[in-house]
Image (cartoon, grey):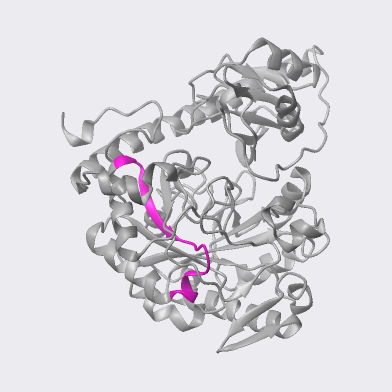
Amino acid sequence: MPAGKMKMNAVVGRGKYVKAAVDGGKMKPAAEYKGCRASANTGQASCGSQAGPGDLPIEIWEKVKNHPCYSEEAHHHYARMHVAVAPACNIQCNYCNRKYDCANESRPGVVSEKLTPEQALRKVLAVATTIPQMTVLGIAGPGDPLANPAKTFKTFELVAKAAPDIKLCLSTNGLALPDHIDTIAGSKIDHVTITINMVDPEIGAKIYPWIFFNHKRYTGIDAARILTDRQLQGLEMLSERGILCKVNSVMIPNINDDHLVEVNKAVKSRGAFLHNIMPLISAPEHGTVFGLNGQRGPTAWELKALQDACEGEIKMMRHCRQCRADAVGLLGEDRSAEFTTDQLMKMDVQYDLEMRKGYQDGVEDERAAKVAAAQKELTEFAGEMSAITLLVAVATKGSGLINEHFGHAKEFQVYELSTSGAKFVGHRRVDVYCQGGYGEEDRLYAIMGGIHDCHAVFVSKIGGCPKSNLIKAGIEPVDQYAHEFIEKSAIAWFKSYLDKVKRGEIQHEQRGDAAIRQGSRISAA
């Protein structure tokens, strides 16, 4: 069978080969294209996360089209991996507690094992051969990559030579960033994420107990002032070099939640491409300062309201999963347990670039079909006007399909529906409901609390007990669109919903808030 015609798996991520991205040559500095284009219908900018090929200069589109973190649409189809080669850190955050041998927590700063650059290279080649759609390698810890520059850049050097099709990403707190701009630019690293939680040192002093800079430890407001100056300087320098920058910000209620609007303005003005505001993870069992002190994270409504307030010419990333520093697979799944050092030594790794390219051609065919199906459904919706907007939850394994059983879901993706279409607005992590073939009642109520703001939940299949309980809670279980495209199905269901409202069969009511899950996820037994 020709490489370009390889049959696609129903569930992307279980095949043998994947195509890689091809860079589109030199990229214009961010300042040259000055943000994003606004939709003529909504006035909303299309930059980064949900942008398409018509919204961005071609050289930018080539950078983001198959990057699961920089493109919301791509994250349904493409995978990423992180390698844990950077254990040391140069700052302390009150929301962070690094662990180097932990397998049961899903949050940044946690890994099962640390790697050398040579071990990391072997892992990258094994993963890229086994997982067809892995297109991105990131180094994000478990400390800070730029506090471990020799290991970080040696890893990137090895991977760039052995697997030149894989995109290289770096995630940093930004303290050491200005000192490494030339090396980053010369290392084929064209995506950098900077965590920026404040631009006001007084607020920063509540988040960062200390930093270690120029062989000296600083604390309090002095530490925060140095950190924010270095972060913003590094962001500007990267933007001037044409390197795409995503800014991560942790939303900490009553500390920086209101202030993040100012952070958004500051990073936008300095050329950031994408802003990711994510919820504080503060479960006591994680051992962080905030977790032990009882600092709460935001509710689902609070997070969405802040993201909506910040959305403008800089696009908001809403599909972040706050990954482990050794995560492997699609966003929302972690297959790192399949690629331990012991297992890698047993694998026969044969990296085949042409076969990867052929497989990704099939990914793109599937992706185009998904977009076309949603557009066709939306075209039939043309002329329909309604002020009603609502949220729905979707159980999916990936590929943009409704292809997960309710009882097996580890998360639900959340879409906002209106007469403008279906917009991805987030996800809700949950504990798996079915355990050994039986449902766990306590987990069912926790799941319903996590999607309480949704009017419906789309699933490939659902049992009688959870179905009846969801209906009683005012959440409609929808299984008639099993294994169909998410956006197309959601728009079709919403059309039917509006028709029922018009006929007086139902009365539309706004739902309440929902909980964002804290703590370690419990999977099926």
Using the image as rendered, state which of residue 428 and residue 328 is in the foreground: 328
Quarter of the figure with residue 180: bottom left
* Percent coordinates x, y for residue 269 in the rendering: 61, 72
**9 vs 25: above or below:** above
Magenta-drawn segment: 130-148
Is 181 a magenta residue? no
Q: Which corner quadrant holds the C terminus?
A: top right
Is 139 a magenta residue? yes
| Residue found 35% across the figure and 42% down from its top | 133
* Percent coordinates x, y for residue 54 in the rendering: 44, 49
**37 vs 506: above or below:** below
Quarter of the figure with residue 447: top right
Using the image as rendered, state which of residue 178 and residue 111 is in the foreground: 111
* Percent coordinates x, y for residue 2 in the rendering: 16, 32
Horizontal relation, residue 254 to residue 221: left or right:
right
| Residue found 54% across the figure and 28% down from its top | 486
Using the image as rendered, state which of residue 230 and residue 499 is in the foreground: 230
Q: Which corner quadrant holds the N terminus?
A: top left
**223 vs 515: above or below:** below
| Residue 492, visible in the rendered structure | yes
Number of marks in picture: 0
| Residue found 42% across the figure and 45% down from its top | 79
Horizontal relation, residue 160 to residue 183: left or right:
left
| Residue found 24% across the figure and 31% down from its top | 6
| Residue 24, visible in the rendered structure | no
